[in-house]
Image (cartoon, grey):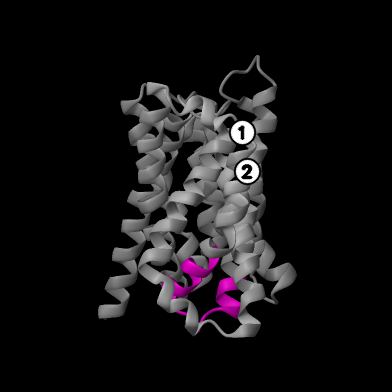
Amino acid sequence: MISKQLKWILLITLALIWGSSFILMKKGLLGLNPFQIGALRIIFTSFFVIVIGFKSIATIKHFQWKYIALTSLFGTFVPAFLFPLAETKVSSSICSILNSLTPLNTLLIGVLTFGLTYNRRQFLGIIIGLFGTAILIFTGDDAANSSNYYFSVFVIIASICYAINVNLIKKYLSDVKPLAITTGNFLILLVPALLVLFFTDFKDRIHTSDTQIALIYILILGVIGTGIANIIFFKLIQMSSALFATSVTYLIPIVAFFWGILDHESLTFMQLLGAFVVLIGVYLANKK
């Protein structure tokens, strides 16, 4: 009973943290470009988790490091750049809704690659979810701006990366402590992130007030929205199922939409319809 209550507490906590991540990225874009946001998010997280979890690395077995590297790539590195790229053209609310495709993609990749089974209801959910996604992409934030279509795809690719990450952790890293997985991930990613940042114009921007304010948002995003959230997420995967853990994306749009309203964002009727269709599809795909 305690473990059942704990997994719901962790799920809601994650929804609050990750639902707030989209507005933090949006605010970060006021002083930084997408590549700087992705790199700094990883760098801030790396220093935080390495300090608190360096000793835990010793618990990772030699053969598990290849899976740690893969989860760092799919679970953090690629999405860290794709989301701020998408938010240059797509609202934070829409990004959070498209991110809800993660459980659906988790099922698809689990079936195609990891030998998971599915039923007719889940297959129907996949079809409905894809239809809802098409509505969201082709209505865009600005119907006259076709580039929004392409930028929405960045979020979909990120959700596929998250789905691969979840399946990898569930199958190959279930016996590794969440803190060790997180620390191992960011130990691997620190140098690549520093290299990405080095090849941007960050040193020229850092003296401006907009960039300094943006750094505060990305610091919060890195430490809380990535470091602490990843530890919670890996724990949730291990104590439940991959599909239950990714069902956090049902709740993320609610939190993100609340922040979007405060920041004067709005959704059209077709976007609300698309969001509703996506969530129905995700619900059916997640239902056994």
Marker disc for residue 196: 2
The answer to whether residue 265 of the structure is visible from this angle is no
CB of mark 2 within 8 Å of CB of mark 1? yes
SS type, badge 1: loop
Q: Is residue 116 above or below residue 8?
A: below
Front residue of this view, candidates 234 and 181 = 181
Amino acid tagged 2: Val
Q: Where is residue 206 in the image (x, y as percent from the top left)?
A: 45, 29
Q: Where is residue 250 in the image (x, y as percent from the top left)?
A: 44, 52
Front residue of this view, candidates 105 and 54 = 54
Q: In percent of the image, x 46 and y 36: which residue is there?
A: 25
Q: In percent of the image, x 44 and y 61: which residue is there?
A: 230
Quarter of the image where the N terminus is located: bottom left
Magenta-highlighted residues: 168-185
Marker disc for residue 186: none
Q: Position of residue 140 (x, y in %)?
A: 60, 26
Identify the residue under disc 1. Answer: 200
Give the distance between the C-alpha atoms of the residues marked 2 and 1, in whole angstroms. 7 Å
Q: Is residue 210 above or below residue 123?
A: above
SS type, badge 2: helix
